[in-house]
Amino acid sequence: MNKIFEKGGKFYWLHSTVDAFETFLHVPGTVTRKGAHVRDAIDLKRILILVVIAAAPAALFGMWNVGYQHGLAIGDTSLNILGNFWYGFLKVLPLYLVSYIVGLGIEFASCQIRGEEVSEGYLVSGFFIPLIVPVDIPLWMLALAVAFAVIFGKEVFGGTGMNIVNPAILTRAFLFFSYPNYMSGSDCWIAYKPTEKLVDGFTGATPLALDGASAQYGTGFWDLFIGTVPGSVGETSVIAILLGAILLIWTGIASWKIMCAGILGALFVGGIGDLAGITTIPCYMQLLYGGFAFGIVFMATDPVTSAQTEAGKWIYGFLIGALCITVRLFNPGYAEGMMLAILLCNVFAPLIDHCVISAHMSRKAKKLKTA
Amino acid sequence: MSQNYVLKKGLNIPVAGEAELRVSKTVAPGIVAVQPTDFKGFLPRLLVKEGDRVLCGSPVMADKKNADILLTSPVSGTVREIVRGEKRKLLAVLVEADVQQQCVDFGVKDVTKLDGKQVREALLASGLWPWLVQRPYGILADPAAQPRDIFVSTFSTAPLAPDAAFCFGSELKAAQAGVCALTKLTSGKVHVSLDSNAGDSPFAALQHCELHTFQGPHPAGNVGVQISHIAPICKGDIVWTVSLAGLVAIGKLFTTGRYNVRRKVAVTGPMALQPSYIDALPGTPMAAIRSFCGNTPADQLRVISGDILSGKAVGMEGYLGFFDNQVTLVREGTDQELLGWIRPFRFNQFSADRSYFSWLLPKKKYAMDTNLHGGPRAFLMNDGYYARVLPMDIYPVYLAKACLAGEIDKMERFGIYEVLPEDLATCEFVDPSKNNIQEMIEQGIDLMLKEMA
């Protein structure tokens, strides 16, 4: 690194930024000073880039789907795969630009203030945020939400690794509570300009919003599984999300326990709802609707904000699944529960861990006493 | 009753440069250092001055808190220099060895006929007492304490660790005498753990002790891990541990009447030319192994007394540590690697994480260097990521964080009594956030020592 960026140099205020770009390009020549003299080749950059790769199929499919749904809405299905993708790509690109410029800007500035190296955490959050918001969201809203989430969700706690709730989910929650008109209803999940004429009788409601009413179209098992339905960019295709899940589980980055427990929790409450006649939806369909799959694979498993202990992961995952479906079944005003379920469980994860560890410690103490 | 413990968690780090089972050099005693810094909790008071004559086994310094604990010279000769560091801290006493070695005669004794007090006195007088390490905290054993049990691990699973059977397999008689001596020091049991990773251990023949066998990857050979499986340390417990080298040295004191700590030392590591064993004393200058380094410039070479995970970088001017029977030579990894982290394959880098492909090459040995492979970050992965390489019933990240925060209650709860920094070395190795976990634990232990004193 050039001397002017070192402490005392003219451009020291850019130190963290320069360091971030420098270490992005090459692994620095830093050697171990204390403790183990050799270290594993793994670093957080590698782990987090794998999360991005895992989410890439969902993102790519989502972009195509944006174009496809737009075509359906205006009754013009002449575009081919690439055309649809290109339309969606141009729609999503500004979201990415806003997400990364605002989020990384704040991250760089905060790291400089703290005098730390820039952490890679936002690389992943920034990749997720455009995937979980409506594609037509005004960019200034997104910028505001990202700023709120990064500052109050993460930096005030001390940056990546110290946060209590997932910044991506917090972004969405901020939008949801501040601008509900843009975040729910039947027309926010499909990209179109106000000047474009919609097909007669078209409703852009997501399958979840149609819940209860007889499903009119595009809500069959396979539509939901493949993802050719309206929704947030990344959340619709269960199969693309499953691809990501396989990579995350194989590399051990995301916990399979949380995912399994989440699915069990959703099936449990969904099944009760079905049996009790609260809903007519079979419980397994709940796994395909809305943001459940994306949330349980990518959001709930965030290693910072999820439960840390092994037993805690089962409890945490189960609660997310169960809460998500509970909100869906018992809240007529708002059809999706995944965001709230994850936020709530993020907050309770430390408590879950505390209970698990306390129970473990007293068991261990008892065992030692009898031994 | 012996029990076989099979440990699943842990990590064998495949470093290149294992020592060949032959002694390539016998280091003739020239200068030998007696270093008080090798012993945690030892406050040195000098008993000699420059120019004094000492014999092998003569006291060189004593502990200020407990004048009975002595460090003795491993050779006979003349005190050449007293090395002091900052604030006149005593770092080493250098003894220049005579050509003809003379030893203090402590007298051959039948250890089975001695009582606890006599064994204690013999160990204290000969300077072998510091081989006894007290847990919790890994400090010098207190001669007035009554240990609950004494533990001996006859093997090490650390990377490139010396082969115990090769080093001490022929000293079975001395080891047996050592075990007999230890039984006099405790009202509890003497637990000896054997390696069952590679066939039968020669130490399975030891008597008057509880034998346990352990199987599994590093750190299964760490005595701390073994204690936590055999009989965990609770608050208020005191146990002692002795290394195999110490056990043999203690045995020899009674069978030969002499202070003899000479042993085989493995010179290992990716940078060692023809890695093999040397015959040496603790305190031997590292210059004695210069022939293993080839032409590597000194600033590109890290000379470690001990293993690659928990050893001490002493440099070519340093000396072999008292407890160490291994020297590791690694390259300083000061070079930058272009786009390292984003390359899909990096077949020459080892990673225990499956986002790299080391799992495809389970037999491969890696010429590792000291590069950190990333920048320091806050803990991001959760506890399970670290616990998979730690075969103990504790939560490593919680413990490390409690140590960082200096919260005594939490440190106690999360198991500070059971661990030494070396036990969490594998956690430190795999940490993608590059935290110095061993240092955190060390800080925690120091705080406990201060607060509980």
Image (cartoon, coloured by chain):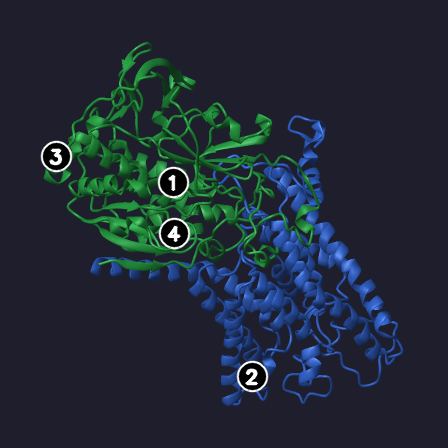
Mark drawn on residue B220: 4
Q: Are marks 3 and 2 in contact (CB under 8 Å)?
A: no
Q: Secondary structure at mark 3?
A: helix
Mark 3 or mark 2, whichever is nearer to me: 3
> Which three-letter amino acid code belongs to the residue tagged 1?
Gly
The chain holding disc 2 is A
**Pointer 1: what residue?**
B444
Q: Are marks 3 and 4 on the same chain?
A: yes
Ranked by sequence position, the earlier of labels 1 and 4 is 4
Q: What's the distance in space between the residues labelled 3 and 2, CA to CA?
A: 74 Å
Q: What's the distance in space between the residues labelled 1 and 4, CA to CA?
A: 23 Å
Q: Are marks 1 and 4 in contact (CB under 8 Å)?
A: no
**Pointer 2: what residue?**
A283
Q: Quadrant of residue A312?
A: bottom left
Residue visible at 84% across and 79% down? A198
Q: Label 3: how many residues lie within 10 Å, few (<14), some (14-19) or many (20+)?
A: few
Residue visible at 30% across and 62% down? A363
Mark 4 or mark 2, whichever is nearer to me: 4
Q: Quadrant of residue B133?
A: top left
Q: Quadrant of residue A54?
A: bottom right
Residue visible at 71% across and 50% down? A102
Q: Colour of chain B?
A: green
Q: Colour of chain A?
A: blue
**Pointer 3: what residue?**
B117
Q: Is residue A293 above or below residue B297?
A: below
Residue visible at 50% across and 37% down? B275
Is residue B137 among what the camera can see? no
The chain holding disc 4 is B
Q: Are marks 3 and 2 on the same chain?
A: no
- Left or right of B348 on screen, residue B129: left
> Which three-letter amino acid code belongs to the residue tagged 3?
Lys
> Which three-letter amino acid code belongs to the residue tagged 4?
Ala
